[in-house]
Image (cartoon, rainbow, N blue to C red):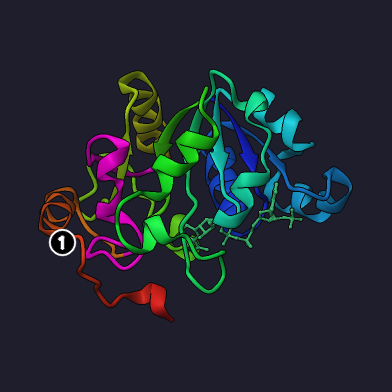
């Protein structure tokens, strides 16, 4: 599979490297252009390009940029694309978004609103970048970690789930994008290593006003 990465920071690099190491192809991009990604290209063994190049390249596109920067993206580029949205909202870093603060919207729902012609799947949000390579396991391993996804398009979710399986992760489908809050920042399943059954339980237990401690706080 070809993965086009918008964002070449911690998450873009970690997912691209895991993908390349597992026989996929990846292209990384950022807002400054491919000339700023020379050492990244060598380290990750991925191609580099502009944002438009990376989106066009991807059978699946990874969106791994600060949440505040999503509004800068040109929606026309993403028409018809499967987009794995890894972006999380951190009040303090991102501009305040009252609809997220009061729980009346979800981050990936807002990404879907902006990228209206894309098939957005919330994915890679609830794992720290430092764990992405470390926690991957072959299918059937007793300690295989499960990661949550959410999305409104079933085919897009199937494609993303197949990619996760090939990269060493089980998947739990948390439902449509409107259920994505269940693994947003500070929820019980956020960035905690969990097997499939444990993750299903944490997603079900999440309460809209509840926050949990976790490794992400460090
Ligand atoms: N770090 C984690 O453990 C983790 C885990 C799960 C989810 N996340 C979420 O994933 C997202 C990325 O996190 P990160 O840790 O990878 O951040 P990061 O290391 O700061 O990387 C962000 C990347 O986005 C690029 N970027 C910024 N604005 C852009 C734009 N308008 N168009 C294209 N590229 C742009 C940056 O490059 P330029 O500035 O050069 O454009 C950089 O390559 C965030 O929303 C974060 O909350 C992070």
| Magenta segment boundaries in residue numbering | 168-191
- Identify the residue at horizontal 43%, vertical 62% (top origin): 131
Residue 47: x %, y % from top left: 75, 37
Q: Is residue 66 visible?
A: no
Residue 200: x %, y % from top left: 14, 49
Residue 187, above or below 41: below
- Identify the residue at horizontal 28%, vertical 62% (top origin): 193
Query: Is residue 189 one of those drawn in magenta?
Result: yes
Please state, as top left, top right, bottom left or bottom right, where the C terminus lies in the image. bottom left
95 relative position to 180: left or right: right
- Identify the residue at horizontal 48%, vertical 70% (top origin): 91
Regarding ligand 1, which quadrant of the image does it lie in? bottom right
- Identify the residue at horizontal 32%, vertical 41% (top origin): 149
Q: Is residue 99 visible?
A: yes
Residue closest to the eye, 18 or 106: 106
Dot 1 alpha-carbon crowd within 10 angstroms: few under 14, some 14 to 19, many 20 or more: few
Residue 67, quarter of the rendered image: bottom right
Residue 132, above or below 1: below
Residue 173, quarter of the rendered image: top left
Q: Residue furthest bottom?
A: 218
How many numbered marks does the figure carry? 1
Q: Secondary structure at mark 1?
A: loop
Residue tagged 1: 207
Q: Residue furthest right?
A: 35
Residue 133: x %, y % from top left: 47, 55
158 relative position to 39: left or right: left
Residue 31, above or below 217: above
Residue 164, quarter of the rendered image: top left
Mark 1 C-beta to ligand 1 under 8 Å: no
Query: Is residue 166 one of those drawn in magenta?
Result: no
Residue closest to the eye, 74 or 30: 74
Residue 146: x %, y % from top left: 26, 49
């Amino acid at each position: 599979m070809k993965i086009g990465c918008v964002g070449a920071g911690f998450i873009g690099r970690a997912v691209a490297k895991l993908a390349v190491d597992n026989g996929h192809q990846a292209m990384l991009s950022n807002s400054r252009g491919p000339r700023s990604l020379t050492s990244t290209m060598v380290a990750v063994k991925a191609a580099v390009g502009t944002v438009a190049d990376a989106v066009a390249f991807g059978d699946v596109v990874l969106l791994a940029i600060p949440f505040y920067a999503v509004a800068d993206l040109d929606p026309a580029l993403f028409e018809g694309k499967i987009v794995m949205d890894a972006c999380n909202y951190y009040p303090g870093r991102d501009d305040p978004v009252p609809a997220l603060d009061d729980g009346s919207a979800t981050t990936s729902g807002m990404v879907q609103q902006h990228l209206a012609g894309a098939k957005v799947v919330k994915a890679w949000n609830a794992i720290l970048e430092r764990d992405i390579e470390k926690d991957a396991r072959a299918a059937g391993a007793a300690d295989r970690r499960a990661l949550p996804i959410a999305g409104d398009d079933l085919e897009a979710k199937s494609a993303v789930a197949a990619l996760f399986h090939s990269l060493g992760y089980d998947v739990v489908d948390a439902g449509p994008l409107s259920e994505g809050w269940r693994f947003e920042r500070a929820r019980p399943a956020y960035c905690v290593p969990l097997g499939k059954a444990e993750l299903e339980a944490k997603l079900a237990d999440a309460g809209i006003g509840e926050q949990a401690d976790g490794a992400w706080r460090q």
